[in-house]
Image: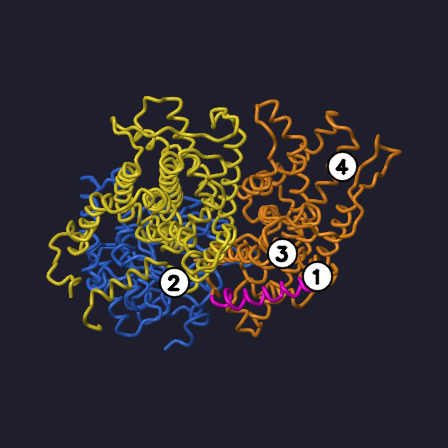
Amino acid sequence: MNGRKIGGVILQVEGISLAFGGVKALSDVSFDVREHELRAIIGPNGAGKSSMLNCINGVYTPQQGRITLHGRSFSEMTPHRAAEMGIARTFQSLALFRGMSVLDNMMAGRNLRMKSNLLLQALRLGPAEREEIEHRAFVEKIIDFLEIQAYRKTPVGRLPYGLQKRVDLGRALAMEPTVLLLDEPMAGMNTEEKQDMCRFILDVNDEFGTTIVLIEHDMGVVMDISDRVVVLDYGKKIGDGTPDQVRASPEVISAYLGVAH
Amino acid sequence: MLYRENGQFKTSYRLDQQMLPIRQDRLLMIGLLLAAFLVVPLLASDYMFRALIVPFLILSISAIGLNILVGYCGQISLGQAAFMAVGAYAAYNLTVRIPELNFLIVLALSGTIAAAVGVVFGVPSLRIKGLYLAVATLAAQFFIDWLFIRVKWFTNYSPSGSVSTSPIEIFGWVVDRPVDKYWLVLGIVVVMTVIAKNLVRSAIGRSWMAIRDMDVAASVIGIRPMHAKLTAFAVCSFYGGVSGALWGFVHLGAWEPLAFGIFLSFNMLFMIIIGGMGSLLGSFFGAAFIVLTPLFLNQLPTWIGIPMSTAMISHLEFMIFGALIVFFLIAEPHGLARLWAIGKEKLRLWPFPH
Amino acid sequence: MTLNLKRNWPVATLFGLLALGMVLPLATGQSAPGFYIEVLLGGLMAGVLYSLVALGFVLIFKASGVFNFAQGAMVLFAALALARMSEVMPLPVAFGLAILIMIVFAWLVERLVLRHLVNQEGVVLLMATLGITYFLDGFGQTVWGSDIYRIDLGLPKEPMIVGQATFEGGILIGQHDLFAAMIAALLVMCLAVFFQKTPTGRALRAVADDHQAAQSIGIPLNRIWVIVWSVAGFVALVAGMIWGAKLGVQFSLQLIALKALPVVILGGLTSVPGAIIAGLIIGVGEKFAEVFLAPVLSSQFGLAGGGIEYWFAYVLALLFLLVRPEGLFGEKHIDRV
């Protein structure tokens, strides 16, 4: 569907099981993600999709299973290590820093790459100032890409929902990730906004080659833009393959899609 | 009309990022500083320096520190007075035991020692939040209170437990007139405010605010909560320590251990709530308010012609503070600084309505 | 609290140390057994009073999610009201009036403060109660005065001496302390039952969990808050009466009541049995530290005087917070994203 070359396996989850008290969120889920591909995770509400993303980037620690990223294997991941290893994500419920402007939210995404220490920052001496400008220039490119120039100094709390979602994406992009986890980036948007967001996601995948793992409910979008799909239901994997394969699978149809049409 | 930004286009990121991007603000700040250094000494009386201006400036430093911790980084501390005490006693011990040290170095060292203590008592913030953290900082307050009373070494074995200081001398300039004290403190305030402003608008400031707004998301984008919180505690205690040292040496001259008790901590918290959390300007507003109110209340009996005992005045002070805290928390959680900002917004448009 | 030792090792260690601290004075023969029991009883009785004030905290927290810093000020205010009114009327009448005053206070707090801060974060509410503390302090002293006042409960002043046969000299038990402990224990048990077993208790817990959700299922938020703060006020009155009768009603009463904060932390903010047990632990621990530990510190480290009581409870709570933030019986808090 596009000319990108999909590479080898970059992320692999094996046997992930996650439980909260008595509630099993994920049971023995395994799948892989290849470099440069656009992988969708779909399933009914409560299937464990967000929990899966949370496990990948260390917000939750699964009781069982391993995560292999860039060839390195972990049974326990922390959010910070995930960020250092190039994983960025957006949140279903918009985890933006409401007290800060759009620009500051996205500059915060650059923090990992900023090196000046406390003293230099305190005195705003040469290197600190230069670094600030250098990262500002990078963030401005993303602002241009997402077409939110007019809002860069606005506190995010004041923006409409659709724009906030863009800022969320922008902040994740500011981290220059190799793997981007998107948790329902189009939730709550109208058709026009969805088209914009689709365009941005595809552009990110095309231009920057970022591997994308996408949770999404809109079947049209999923079937259109993703390379491969994982289907979860009640914490278990019930489908894994190309959109066409998944669409035809009887288990997926009965659990989620309904009668094939 | 006067306050419009029209025509002030920023042609580089450097210009956009400077501390005071609007030209009118820059002019105002220069004017303010000139007035503060040159004009005020001509106009203000010794009493005004001693009772109003110098305490206001000294407490502003501590308020800035506390605002960084509470307003910018979203933690809570009910023990700021304890860190001020650490600074004061550190400065005392340094001047007594190493008299040759330049006072400015003593200040820097006292702040650093206070910062170290602050980091230690900030460690609980890595695991606990909100009210639990408040109790932890209370523990710090009471423990440090007790330490300075009981461990005689700190007060140089003074029999009464109080310590007294001699006038400060820096490079031959003896700071004993009220106007001298004013200049010294003003200079320190200017430097420390610039530093605070720099910190707040750079990467570390963003990491503080990120932790405040949503610490789970912050860790996801690679900010280390531990680093952010402990630096916030360190900076807060540094400012508190410097402020405490100045409070003891410049304002009080002599003090007993309970001078830095729990009610000073509460007052500091009130300063930033009323003044505005998350705003450096708010720290100044709050400090001014807390310093002015008792003085104002002291004059009240003479103004309205009803005699009131000093006890009554202090009760009134408590009631007013309490009521105002509740009022600000309900009506304007961002304090006087927000009211000021709203005023400025209106000024931008003036004389047009919108 | 499971017996999973791997997770609970900090608690086990702490209890081990506390137990050791309690046994040592007896074992080393540093103190006579009779004196030891006196200290123990004194600690237990202080502990019961701490539990009482702590229960006020827990009540308000469970029902409104508010950490009521003003509980100490409420104790002082109630005691002042009682002391001053009992000067001009019989004690039971004054007591009844004081209850009414605390109910009015609860109603005012709900109306003027809580109603406007629904669903704000805990820290904001904490600071609001700090404001209430200051206001109540100033107001109370304006209305009732700021001297030291007496409350006369009509109890005999001489202590009882029991167990003269077993212990040399017998054990001194202040009758006042005994009476106080019994009242407090009774009240504590009633409150515990109220919370755990009644439908109102369940409603209170729902409200503590989520104000808006509770409202949407028809729980009258405002009325619940008035009820809870009134009960907390009543608790404050009883505690103030007992303490005030013993120590005199004065400003420092408030700081003693503030000791209940570490009790609540240790026991777990949401736990009624936790408040009780933690109160006893801190009461006893404090007394023991003051009586047996202070001389050791003084002789070994040259630290003059005592005053360990000042911070012992807080530091204990702090240590606990580091290893087990939810306290002994509290609920663990999970952040969901």
* Amino acid type, callout 1: Ala
Q: Nearer the viewer, mark 2 or mark 1?
A: 1
**Element type at marker 2?**
loop
Image side of residue B334 versus residue C206, left or right: left
Task: Report which residue position mark 1 lands on.
Answer: C94
* Amino acid type, callout 2: Glu
* Amino acid type, callout 3: Gly
Task: Report which residue position mark 4 lands on.
Answer: C38
- Image position of C135 with respect to C311: above or below: below
Query: Which numbered tag is attached to residue B332?
Result: 2
On the same chain: label 1 and label 3? yes
On the same chain: label 3 and label 2? no
Q: Which residues are magenta?
A: C96-116
In the image, farthest residue toward the right: C165
Tell me where residue A72 appears, x and y as whole percent. 36, 42
Image side of residue A149 versus residue A223, left or right: left
